[in-house]
Image: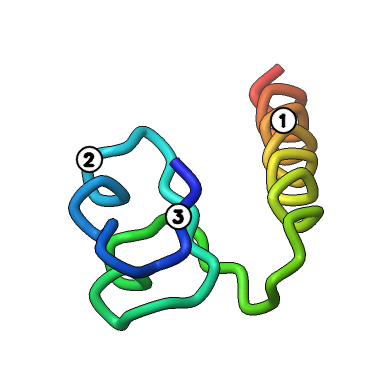
Amino acid sequence: MVGDGNNDASALAVADIGITMGGTQLATDAADAVIISDDLEAVAEIFAIAAKTHRRIRQNLG
């Protein structure tokens, strides 16, 4: 779930992955990731970082 941070804190809290683009304090607390800018390309970058992290963890576990 990607939200703008207004009126979507409950949806961010129950989503498998919650990403907010700023917004209210409640939304930023409920989200797994917070994007400070208004750039939607940052969402793709978050998923790329997560994929690289997942590969590294699997590599380390052998």
Say which residue label 1 marks.
60
Residue 11, image x, y percentages: 25, 46
Q: Kindly report which numbered mark, 1 or 2, lies closer to the viewer in this rendering.
A: 2
Q: Kindly report which numbered mark, 2 or 3, lies closer to the viewer in this rendering.
A: 3
Is disc 2 placed on a helix, strand or loop? helix
Is disc 3 placed on a helix, strand or loop? strand
Residue drawn at x 45%, y 55% is: 3
Residue drawn at x 18%, y 52% is: 10
Q: Is residue 58 above or below residue 50?
A: above
Say which residue label 2 marks.
14
Q: Nearer the viewer, residue 3 or 48?
A: 3
Q: Kindly report which numbered mark, 3 or 1, lies closer to the viewer in this rendering.
A: 3
Residue drawn at x 50%, y 48% is: 2
Q: CA distance from mark 1 to mark 2?
A: 30 Å
Asked whether disc 2 touches disc 3, contact meaning CB atoms under 8 Å apart, the reply is no
Is disc 1 placed on a helix, strand or loop? helix
Q: CA distance from mark 2 to mark 3?
A: 13 Å
